[in-house]
Image (cartoon, helix red, strand yellow):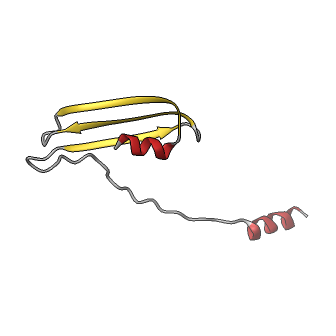
Amino acid sequence: MFKFVEDADSVTAVRVETSRVGISISWQFPPSGWLKRNTDGSALGCPGPAGAGGVLRNEYGGFIYGFASPFKRANAILMECYAL
């Protein structure tokens, strides 16, 4: 009986092989003479507590300007737009 259960388990078992490919992601400096703006907005719920912010950096990565704004209730799409 136990052999039957073992055989049944081996037939019905699903094996999924996955492979992962590593991708290096890092911030890139803007071209010489340019500034780079990075922004983001998010919300915890729809609607829910939310916020948006951003940073402006020069060609050397030096900080020029930044902002962060909390909101009592908003959705993620509105916050992404506000951050722009």
Q: Is residue 6 shown above or below 54?
A: below
* Whether residue 6 is situated above or below residue 58 in the rendered picture: below
Rendered residue at 85%/64% (across/down): 5
Q: Residue furthest right?
A: 1
Give residue 84's position: percent from left, percent from top: 34, 44
Q: Where in the figure is residue 10, as x and y percent of width and height?
A: 74, 67
User: Left or right: 41 with respect to 65?
Assistant: right
Taking the image as shown, residue 65 lies to the left or right of residue 10, namely left
Residue 6 vertical placement versus 71 (above, below): below
**Which residue sits at x=42%, y=44%?**
80
Instruction: Identify which residue is drawn at 18% across, 33% down.
Output: 64
User: Residue 4: x, y in percent?
Assistant: 86, 67
Res 12 quadrant in image? bottom right
Q: Quadrant of the N terminus?
A: bottom right
Residue shown at 13%/39% (left/top)?
60
Frontmost residue, 27 versus 23: 27
Viewer-side residue, 39 vs 77: 77
In the rendering, at what x and y percent does residue 21 appear?
Answer: 40, 60
- Is the residue 57 above or below the residue 5 in the image? above
